Structure formats: C-alpha cells, structure tokens
Image (cartoon, helix red, strand yellow):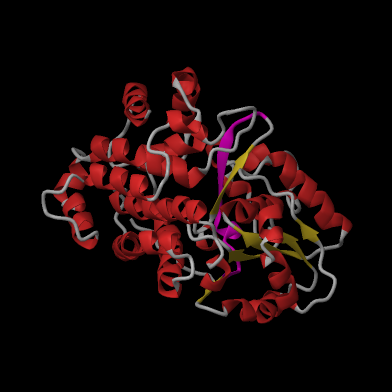
Amino acid sequence: MAYIYYLTHTHLGFDALAQLPSECARVGMRRPLVITDKGVVAAGLAARAVEALKLGDVPVFDDTPSNPTEAMVLAAVERYRHEGCDGLVAVGGGSSIDLAKGVAIAATHPGALTQYATIEGGSGKITDACAPLIAVPTTSGTGSEVARGAIVILNDGRKLGFHSWHLLPKSAICDPGLTLGLPPQLTAATGMDAIAHCIETFLAPAFNPPADGIALDGLERAWANIERATQDGSDRDARLNMMSASMQGAMAFQKGLGCVHSLSHPLGGVPVNGRTSLHHGTLNAVVLPAVLRFNASAEAVVANRRYARMRRVMNLSDNADLPQALFDMAARLGLPTGLRQMGVDESVFDKVIQGALADHCHKTNPREASADDYRRMLTESL
C-alpha cells in the first residue's frame, strides 16, 4: 500500500520572504532562534530574514558547519534554551535546515541524539513535541525545507539520517531572490543535488505515481535551467525553476532514494585534509553515472521504461547514454568528475561500503547492491 503525505505550507516565488511574520504567527512562534551559517551571514541573507521577521532582537546561531554535526546541534540547543526560544527559523542551505531539525529533536526529547537515528530504530521515538521549524532555503539543492529527514554527523563519526513527519517544517519560504548571489560553483553543486534527488526518487521501486510525476517535472526544470543559473546567477527565471526543482525533488523523495545517497552519506563523513566537509551535492554528481550504469538492468527500471522517460524530459535522444550525459553535465558545470579530485582514494572504501550497506537509502534502490557492487561503483567513480 502506498502512503502519500504532502502537508506543509509552501510559499514559492520572488518576495516570498515577506510571508515570514505571518507564518511565525500562524504556528505560534514568538521568539525563534535563527539557525544559519557564517557564509549566509556574510552575504547579508540572515540579516534580511531577521529584518523580515519584525520581532526585534532575535537570537542568531551562525555556527552551522558545512556538514551538520551533533556537537553543533547541542551547542545550538544550549543557545535555544538560554534565550528562552519557542521555535526555529532555519536560513541557509540543507546544512542549516538539517541542523535545525537536529535541534528540534534534541531540545525537546530526552537522551542522546543517536537513539533517534533512523537506522537505530529511532523514527518512532520522535514525537510531536519537536520544536516548530520554519525553513528559508538560500540554495536550490537539498529541498530539506519540504522533507521529513535530516542528515547529521554524530560524535561517533557516523553520518546518519533522522526521519519523522514531526520534523517536517511547519512552513517553507522558498524565495529564489535569496539565491541570486549564489556563486557559480555552489549553484552547480546544489543544482546537481536536486537533479540526483529527482532521478533517484523516480527510479525507486515504490508505487507512488504523484511522486513520479513531481520528480519528472522537477528533473525537466533542473536539467533545462542548471547551466543558465550557473552561468548567469541573475537569471530570475532560471533561479525560480531551480528552486522549484529542488523543492520537487524533496517532495518526491518520500518515495525513497538509492545507491547515490547511500554512498554519498558515508563519503560525506570521510576525513579529507583533516575535515569532514565534502559537499553532498558534488558527491552525488560524481557517483551518479556509476549508479545509473548499475541500475540500468533493474527489473522495475526496465519494465517501466524509466530511463526512456528520463531521456525524454531531459531532451536527449532515444539512444543517448544517460550516465555519460550526467558526467558531461558535471564537467560543463566545472564540477569534479571523479572522487580523486575531491581527495578520496581507495583507502576509505571499506568504511564507505560499510556505511552504504547500513544507510537508510540502501534498501530503496531499484536493485539491491552488494559490498562488491558498491566497490565497483566507487572504483568507477574515482
């Protein structure tokens, strides 16, 4: 049986930020903690959100790392409690929104954060006590503003997912005007994240026709606009379509993701140059061609002509090499096309494969991957 759930308030369009005060009032949020990062602060976007709130002196936590960590979740919880906050406004990319979701759990639920992770059986322990969250994305990639999940690197080094409908933001303020100043490299990387979401959820075998339709439309918008948005960041139409595609990918991925994400999650926790900061969207772009080659023979993919349908909305020829098209797009966008370019080598494969097999996206791939399959995909992605 399919369970289909699309229930959040979404404002999509230029000047949507003006809806922030009314959305706070609607959910009863009088003193929010703004969760953001230093880059968003430097770009002046956090200040724009604080000003739009019209609540006076609003506390701001701007220490979100490039990949949210349990340590920073707990630091934000301490600030949340010290300031007497009653809700959260996340302003930034997926990292800030996911960090805020971690705070929503940890500020209102007892015990260690680890126990609420999906693969630890924690989803059912997350209750409606979660702090209310309003999400204001400043990138077009993760779609976390309309998703029920968050990814956090725990203190034990694992990069794990947390999933509950209670984590779904009460409102998503999707204003493409906030992305107009996004640098080309980040535009490209986050845009490829949106494309990966649309592709993976469309390929996931669960029966969910609305998700399939949303994902295909999102893929069509992203594929047609990602180069325009990257080359000309002031292109308002391209920015609007990329923000919509990002949102659509996440609306659809309640259907499930797959091996791209089961690989990119542990890869994102690999220490490179002493830091665990490999960009999630870039990792997705790098491993996507190998995963598409692996999934090409999956029964559900072949029977439902999934690749043919994707080629059609991507305006590719009937016999186009789909994995090569994704590889070529990443190259045209100036993104890394191999893991070695990102500082990853074979020495981390065992740890990554272990994480991939345990990841919550592993079982929703259209074809189940073995350890050897993951090793081949990683080798092909080097």
Which residue is farthest top? 347
Single out the residue that lies furthest toward the right: 82
- The answer to which quarter of the image holds residue 28 is bottom right
- x and y, in percent, of residue 244 in the image: 43, 68
Residue at the location (62% across, 45% down)?
A: 66
- Residue 132 in view, yes or no: no
Q: Is residue 227 above or below residue 279?
A: below
One can see residue 127 in this view: yes
Q: Position of residue 232 (x, y in %)?
A: 44, 65
Position above or below: 346 against 259: above
> Residue sitting at 41 percent across and 51 percent down?
192
Q: Residue 164's x, y, as percent?
A: 56, 53
Decide which of 382, 116 is in the foreground and name it.
Answer: 382
Q: Residue furthest front?
A: 231
Image quadrant where residue 88 sits: bottom right
Figure label count: 0
Q: How far across and down, in percent of the image, does residue 268 sit?
A: 53, 36
- 176 relative to 348, above or below: below
Residue 167 falls within the magenta-colored stretch? yes
Residue nearer the viewer, 328 or 373: 328
Residue at (68% x, 51% y) in the render: 105
- Report if residue 106 lies within the magenta region: no
Which residue is located at x 53 percent, y 57 percent? 183
- Report whether 253 appears left or right of 373: right
Q: Quadrant of the N terminus?
A: bottom left
Quadrant of the drawing holding the C terminus = top left
The part of the chain drawn in magenta is 156-173
Q: Is residue 315 left or right of residue 337?
A: left
